[in-house]
Image (cartoon, rainbow, N blue to C red):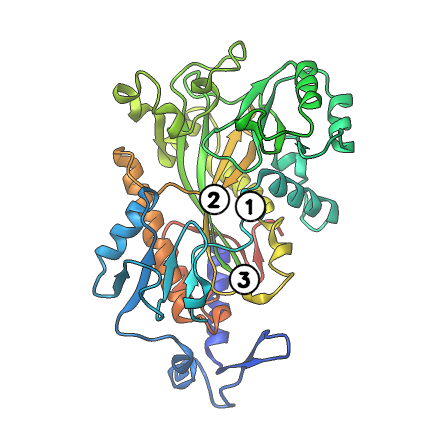
Amino acid sequence: MKFANYISKYVAIFILASIVVCEEDDDDEMNYKYDCGEEQNSNNMNSCSIQGMMHHKDKYEVFVIESSNNYFIRQYFEQNQQTWNIIKKSTQSSSLDLVIINENIDWKIVNDHVIISVWPLSNQFYNKANFYKNAEKLHRSGKIGELSINDVMPLTYFIDMNLPKFSDEEKEFFRVHKSGVWIKKPVEDHRCKGIEVFDDLKQFQLKVGKNKPFKKQNYPQDKKSWIVQKYIENSLLIEGRKFDVRCFVLVASFDPYVLLYHPGYVRRSLEQFSLQDLSNKFIHCVNQSVQMKHKNYQQRKLETIWTYEHFENWLKQNNQNPLQIEENMKKRLAYSALGQKEFVTTGKRQLHINKFQLFGADVSFDDKYTPYVIEFNEEVYLGQYHIPDLDVIFKQVVKSMLQIEQNHMKYHKIPHYYFSSPQFLEDMGKFQILYNEATNYSIIQ
């Protein structure tokens, strides 16, 4: 990773030696030309027109949607009011510079320089069926190095409850698999809503067949389609309890496509792991939203979270190499996120430019320390759990993310310039690069 950062710095020096001139073509695509004249070099690069193409204001305007999820984001802007003016309603200003939302915005008020925290096609990440199918398609393309889809994610099938009959994929699932532990998840729910861990495949097949297609009055919780994913029966355990790593994957830019990783933290269950009690969510679901309902949560809540540094020390105590394990995680996260890149290169470019999005990526391990990407989550909680370690981590993530996007906003006409510059590397904080289209770097090349 350090090597990649050094390469990015050298690339930036060459780019800085040029004037950037933007031209629009017939498809509204932005082309970049670098030409400062024959005498231009890194010593007089400030005489270029880079500054003229930047978005400068004495004070920038930001709209942050009211939500407990965004507590530390709002706190960041309140503590930096010399730079930011917080707009209370998105309709109050036609000169917004940054929009932090969890939903759609009135696009009529958004100028072309505004940086927005939601990608219009983000369901390609958080929809569990889309997420797996896109990664599977990337696997079939053969363009992703030595990893395969089965190295990256547990085996997954899509159960489409809108169809009146079994699909070919569903028939294959029930024909091939007669035993084992599986987990059913609604494709767009989160925080363990609607999940079911089961090992009676015959009963599950009867349930699916009986309720196809779903009627409005049937099973309100299950009105959506599902994925069925192989449960990691030989889970790696800490003190006999299940855990996962909640990483952060920041798509810092969709054009150019830039993927960043933050190690995040470890989430732990409060009850001992067992495959004899598959209905107990306190065993099988490590989300804080579930664990906080445990009768002993208030007394033991600090047990539910480890810092990533604590996890690294635990790995060392178990004779494991933390750097290698993290490298394995990062490669699998990059693989997963690159599966969605196809949707950035198709459709109108306006959908992709000046957008970014933070995802919560959940990684589980088997007892051989092999990581598996379970899912990406769109609704990333950056609020208060009143757990000191989490407060520190959330503040780190927010500060670096917003510093990156502030400069993304300033260089919105020349994003390739910014994302290949030393300034970008300084802004990253504890984020690490998984993929950077601006410098042609990929961790899984």
* Badge 1 amino acid: Phe
Q: Reading the chain from its start, which is encountered first: label 3 or label 2?
A: 3
Classify 306 as above or below 278: below
Horizontal and vertical percent for residue 69? 34, 43
| Residue that numbered label 2 is attached to | 378
Residue, disc 1: 125
Q: Is residue 255 visible in this depiction of the protein?
A: no
SS state under label 2: loop
Where does residue 352 sit, x and y in percent of width and height?
54, 62
Sequence-wise first label, 3 or 1: 1
Q: Residue at x 70, y 19 (%)?
A: 205
Spatial distance from mark 3 to mark 2, Cα to Cα?
17 Å
- Tag 1 near tag 2, CB within 8 Å: yes
Residue at disc 3, secondary structure: loop
Circle nearer the N terminus (1, 2): 1
Q: Can the viewer see residue 307? A: yes
Residue at the spot of label 3: 352
- Relative side of 221 to 176, left or right: left
